[in-house]
Amino acid sequence: MKKKILMIVAGMLLCSNLFGCGTGLSEPDDYVTNEGYKSVQEGGEVSQGDPSKAIPVEEIKVGVLYISDPVEGSGYSYTHDLGIQGMQSNLGLSDAQIERKIVDDSDKDATQKAIEEFVADGCNVIFATSWGYMETTAEMAEKYPDIYFSHGTGYMSNGKNFNNYFGRIYQARYLSGIVAGMNTKTNKIGYVAAQDSSNSEVTGGIDAFAIGVEAVNPDAKIYVVVTNSWYDPQKEEAGAKKLLDMGCDVMAQHCDTPFPMTLAQEYGVYGIGYNSDMKKEVPKACLCSVIWNWSAYYTSAVDSIISGTWNGKNYYGGMNEGLVEITELASFCKDGTQDKVSEATELILSGTYNVFDGELKTNTGEIIGKEGQTLDDATITGGINWYYQNVVVVE
């Protein structure tokens, strides 16, 4: 994949606004694509909003809720903050126009308090980046109809001042599954997951990864440990150790910390990073990373508010929009891995292959889907509550 990329100086451009900000990000170490933003601005249907509600760029103030400190590691909040920094750079916002708060997304009272503080500080755009903020954000959007609320992951929105944004991360998950399947020697692949099968976001990612593994290695199994928490360093570390002690020689993850990767390197095996490019932390283990380029969404969202074209619609981008991708493969990947990934990438980008195509067999023997059809977006985002046939849940 050839991407036009913009380096975002992650040396904490906005350090003074971050909680617990230190010097850990003093050098740029990630790239954020702006292709999604450009495609929104340059082509396709023009959004129909209300020009009378446009907010001048100098009057924009953005509040962002995070579940963990962005300066800690390379995980979920870190990656979202790279996107916020990218948006700030693209639109020319000052440091004073960005405000951040770190709040446990399971604490409704704390979430409500944080949003009230954003409002009191003059924020007119509020991004809530984690699933658990969803219901409280929906309530606050009704209370403050003149403020724009945008919630990452989940499914709720009101079509007015509260929308939902997420992406086709399963596309990149599938590609990373090909990488894992090509590079395992034990045919045991580990996966640390934040939530169980009741959560379609996590389960859909696991299944897409598993389908990718099977495409190149039908003998391999994916062993999943569930932490039941979006952010729990102790459980994530313990889960990774359990899988590695079982003999898993490639580790993947849907969790916030990089423990599955750092421990993989300690054990002398491989890993598939998530959220941002983790090779900077584990250069000897990282085969590739599944990454989000959140700047593509944040820039287009805030720009639509500035231009008066915000229409309240949900956003669901993918590889074609530049929102998700996998990083360049490590030089130590098995010969032929890049060829397989390139072939699959071309099929996805062309729309020839959609990952959840045809009949899909679950690990309980059920058949999902139909020949000649693919699962629709509503099912992918809210109805994948089953595991693919090569997935084994480790209790």
Image: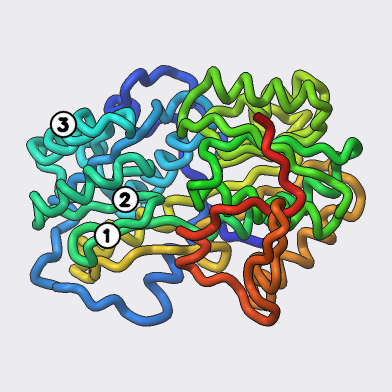
How far is mark 3 from mark 2, CA to CA?
17 Å
Residue beneath the point at 66% across and 62% down: 2
* Residue farthest along the front direction in this orientation: 365
- Identify the residue at image location x=72%, y=46%: 391
Going from N to C along the chain, the mark reached first, 1 or 2, is 2
- The answer to whether 83 appears left or right of 384 in the picture is left
Residue labelled with disc 1: 157
Q: Which is more N-terminal, label 2 or label 3?
A: 3
Tag 3 and tag 2, C-beta contact below 8 Å = no
Q: Tell me if residue 277 can be seen.
A: no
The answer to whether mark 3 and mark 1 are in CB contact below 8 A is: no
Q: Circle 2 sits on which residue?
A: 151
Q: Nearer the viewer, residue 23 or 317?
A: 317
Residue 84 in view in this figure? yes
Q: Which residue is mark 3?
A: 113
Label 1 – label 2 distance at C-alpha: 8 Å
Q: Residues within 10 Å of mark 3 (few under 14, many from 20)?
A: few
Q: Amino acid at mark 1?
A: Ser
Q: Is residue 359 above or below residue 222?
A: below
- Judging depth in this view, the residue of 51 and 344 nearest the camera is 344
